Amino acid sequence: MLLSGCATTLHSDVTAFNDWPADIQDKSFAFEAPQGADDTLEYRNYQLLVAGELGKMGFHQVAEGQQPKLLVGMKYFTIDHPVRVLQEDPFMGPYWGPGYGRYAWGYSRWGYRPFFYDPYRFGPSYVEERIKHLYQRQLRVTINNVSGRKLYDVTVQNTSGVQATPHVMPALVQSAFTGFPGQNGVPRTIDITIEPKTETVQAAAAAPKAN
């Protein structure tokens, strides 16, 4: 079975502040150690994404035990905002008893099924309540030199209906370094399209039951 989706365009609000030296030569860096509960495999995977974007701009991560010139920090969070939505279904009509409605077949979200409608009544007559989830995400990346001087501080904010943070994070990281170091303190909106991923899932056959 193939699982796939549609391409999604993420609209991110990006604001960067910088005091970037024009004559910086040594771009060696190391990541600040994550604190406590932040030290997860997911967090370290996102560090790899940041390192990849920095590598495109001539930065290089030092090996463990070596002294870097720059320290890179990263923080992120995701907040789920449930929203109550009332959705009308034009295929579901009212039945008000004999003589008031007409009987017909049609397609609805529940498949091909009978329903009743009134030819003199306009507009949808069935309202379904459901919960729509919007996911607010924020990524912040900082770059300081080893003496503590702040050089770069960028915040990326995005709200979308994409549930999986790992699917969104590459676009957020790319947005954080688009036009690096950029204009100081000028908010921007950056659009990045995420291509759908296709995954092959093998469905295991059920074992025969013993008699």
Image: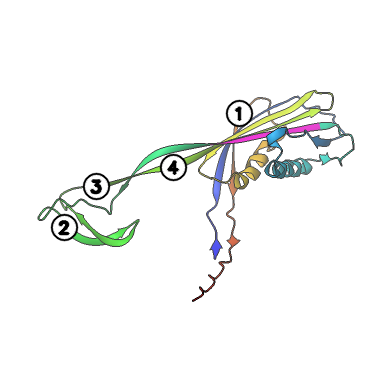
- SS of the residue under disc 1: loop
**Residue found at the very far left of the displayed protein:** 99
Residue identified by numbered label 3: 125
Q: CA distance from mark 3 to mark 2?
A: 14 Å
| Lower position in the chain sequence, tag 2 or tag 4 | 2
Q: Quadrant of the N terminus?
A: bottom right
State the SS at label 2: strand
Query: Where is residue 168, by image quadrant?
Result: top right
- The disc, 4 or 3, on the residue closer to the chain's N-terminal end is 3
Amino acid identity at mark 2: Arg
Three-letter amino acid code of the residue under disc 4: Lys
Is disc 3 placed on a helix, strand or loop? loop
Residue beneath the point at 55% across and 63% down: 2
Disc 2/disc 4 C-alpha distance (Å):
33 Å
Q: Amino acid at mark 1?
A: Pro
| Foreground residue among 179 and 30 | 30
Above or below, comparing residue 8 to residue 20 in the picture: below
> Which residue is under mark 4?
132
Q: Is residue 82 left or right of residue 57?
A: left
Q: Which mark is residue 63?
A: none
Residue neighbourhood size for the residue with mark 3, other residues' Cα within 10 Å, grouped as few (<14), some (14–19), many (≥20): some
Q: Quadrant of residue 48?
A: top right
Which of the two marks, 1 or 4, is nearer to us in this view?
4
Contact flag, marks 2 and 1 (Cβ < 8 Å): no
Rendered residue at 74%/32% (across/down): 73
* Tag 3 near tag 2, CB within 8 Å: no
Q: Residue at x 65, y 39 (%)?
A: 175
Q: Does label 3 or label 2 sit earlier along the sequence?
A: 2
Residue under numbered circle 2? 102
Amino acid type for the residue under numbered disc 3: Ser
Please state the extent of the stretch shown in magenta in the rendering.
Answer: 71-79
